[in-house]
Image: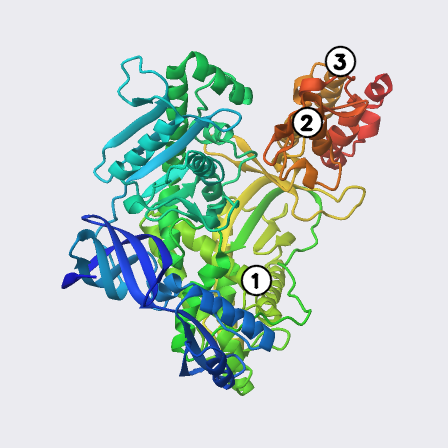
Amino acid sequence: MPTSGFTTVKGRILTRQTLPATDGMCLRYCLKTDSGPLTVDVPGEAQVAFVPQFAVAAIARRFPSVTCRHLPMKDFQQQPVAAVYCHNRKQFRELQRWSREQQIALHEAEIRPHQRYLIERFIALDAEFFGCFNENNAAHFVASKARPATLADDVALNVVSLDVECSFNGELYSVGLYGENDQGVLLRKVIMVGQAHGSEDWIDWVADEKHLLEALVAWFAAWQPDVMLGWSVVTFDLALLWRRFAFYNIPAALGRDGALLEWLVEGKFRPETLLLPGIVVLDGIDWLKAAFYKFERYSLEHVSQQLLGEGKDIQDVDNRGQEITRLFQEDKLALARYNLSDCRLVWQIFAKTHLLSFAIARAQLTGLEFGRVGASVAAFNNLYLPHLHRAGYIAPAEPVSDGLESPGGYVMDSIPGLYCDILVLDFKSLYPSIIRTFLIDPLGMILGLAQEPSETVDGYRGARFSRQHFILPKLVAKLAQAREQAKQQKDAPLSQAIKIIMNSLYGVLGSRGCVFHDARLASSITMRGHWIMQTTKTWIEELGYKVIYGDTDSTFIWLGDKHGIKEPEDFGIKLAADITERWRDYIKQAFGLECALELEFDSHYQRFLMPTLRGSVEGSKKRYVGAVRGVDGELELIFKGMEQVRSDWSPIAKRIQYELYQRLFNDLDVAEYLSEQVELLQQGKLDDELVFSKQLRRSVDAYQSNVPHVKVAQLLVSAFDDSSYGKKGQRVEYIITVNGPEPVELTRSAVDYLYYLEKQIKPIAEPVLSMLNLSFNQLVLRQMTLI
């Protein structure tokens, strides 16, 4: 390829892939630079894995074109290893198959070439490449070297929110586009099938669906988006567009420089199989979940109402499929406004929650592809492997599995009751702090087991960790420092991203999907956590206070009636600081280690109820209700593990439960209120609150149990002869009648009020009534007799 002018370029890596080439594999990185989009190719690369050195001769005989190179590195069994370089995917797949047959361990085979090239150089998201531009294409760069880059300013991106409207059988009506380019220019565009009418300049009218697809390709080529936002944008919008492009035999050239929209696995329209070079695709549902936002439902209507206070621009949201078709036939301008409004809602949700900044921060921290959700194991590998290699070791080929698993987090037996003044103290990032303090590390354990006990720190289940050689504690300490800086700079997305990554490290080590998994590692974290929580409880109770509950990293303390503490919050802050200082002294004296444990004041519950297990006098776990004083002076209720926060309870149960606790904590009458509600239920005046709403997590055919919402979905499919009622993701609404669950649309039988009384109201009322020495059955005996 003719090139000239050796130089360097810096930019943010949007997408990455490995392509076949005549001289091996070509690594392609689509960047966004200060001067615009740039495609960088790194030619002549190979797929790399590691094997024991004794296998090199056999591999050379079987695969003469494969390159093997002895290295001064070892595996976790202290055996020398060699690197194996395959220059095409077919060759590598054959090597994998042969190595399995020969029972030869192939280490780090899952790391793709375009990913290994970056992580071995500590490149996460922003990179500097050394090479030269293609003489025939100024937007194409050929690189021979790379290193991490620190960009002077945040890279401005072309961001678009995309939404597709279509008929029931998938024929396109319109495509909406809403966003902003890297110059701050606002985009409002709808490409609509139909004859032009009206003066709206943001609508591009096209003759038919085929012309719509061609117009969309032209728009992508002209606007060159770097990031695409949407709602189920991969599984619905892009999957539908791909099908319609294929139907008309039109290349789906939506990517950088006309690259095709493709799927790595045929028929699997999932984010992990999407290939769209040069464009990062962020789905709102996936990224809200990744950032630990929780909603009862994740429909765009529900989430936008919760976050923005507005919903879809359509009259009949529940039957929007029919309404969209009606608008397309009768009022295309209204459909265009609806289409654009959906795009805008998604855009504003991302803006409100800072999801784009969160996605960028996550990629910068982990080296994961910009836009990739989940992948905690891959993130761990990206962070850990380059340090491991420089220490002279490679990753295990598979996890240690001896049938022994680590216990979960510590959960104390609770002391049930109705309390005043409960303080909650939390250990800040407990598991990461344990890793830092007690030097818990995969390599450190391998080395520690070969060292003298005096040179190690004891773990659990036979683990010992080297005091001199470790990787993970240093990585955690670096992340913790970065989080503190993010907090000081009020960078909430970065702080949240770091917190999630730090807390995922234990989960990775405890997962059999991670090659570093070893029960001794995970147990040395969780069992140490048990000891820390139990010791903390003992120290607090030595001061004269009562610990009524503990869960993983949280300790619930009852101040009691005799201490006369006037400012509980100030006391909680001081108590947390005192216990933290005691831990530092103890760890130093007992282990000779620096302590990273930090106890923080979390909450002061002015009123608090720890319920019993149903039908038992024992205290419950992971279930409680507390009341904190809000900024307006009113008591705000916090529910944990209760029906209030679960989606499988009826609206009437949630409303009555909330009001019962409001009355309990404010010393108002409970019995009279409950009796009134039971009477209203019996009279049929609360029927609007009896509707259950539940989403199918898979298609009805995939369910083995005939639970109520599945049974209702089957009834709907049969009644309307429409399989869409039984598809995954469909929301089913039903009422429990004397003849069982019936769809709201087809309710024929009388409501089973006794069911709602016994199965909905009684379970949520009994914890409250028991604290007042009242009986639910006696209280509502009259109403039950009348029903």
Residue 273, position in %: x, y?
Answer: 47, 49
Q: Element under label 3?
A: loop
Q: Element under label 2?
A: helix
Residue occupying the point 34% across, 27% down: 211
- First in residue order: circle 2 vs circle 1: 1
Residue occupying the point 28% across, 52% down: 31
Query: Mark 3, mark 2: which one is toward the viewer?
Result: 2
Residue occupying the point 40% across, 72% down: 387
Query: Mark 2, mark 1: which one is toward the viewer?
Result: 2
Mark 1 residue type? Gly
Mark 2 residue type? Val
Q: Residues within 10 Å of mark 1 (few under 14, many from 20)?
A: few
The residue wearing badge 1 is: 513
Residue 682, position in %: x, y?
Answer: 77, 17
Image quarter where the C terminus lies is top right
| Along the line of sight, the residue nearer the viewer: 742 or 48 | 48
For the question of whether residue 499 can be seen, the reply is yes
Q: Element under label 1?
A: loop
Give how far apart the Cα atoms at labels 3 and 1 are: 55 Å
Tags 2 and 1 in contact by the CB under 8 Å rule? no
Image quarter where the N terminus lies is bottom left
Residue 469: quadrant of the picture: bottom left
Query: Mark 3, mark 1: which one is toward the viewer?
Result: 1
The residue wearing badge 3 is: 683
The residue wearing badge 2 is: 717
Q: Outermost residue toward the right?
A: 785
Q: Residues within 10 Å of mark 3 (few under 14, many from 20)?
A: few
- First in residue order: circle 3 vs circle 1: 1
From the viewer's perspective, is 360 left or right of 750?
A: left
Mark 3 residue type? Gln
Give how far apart the Cα atoms at labels 2 and 1 are: 38 Å
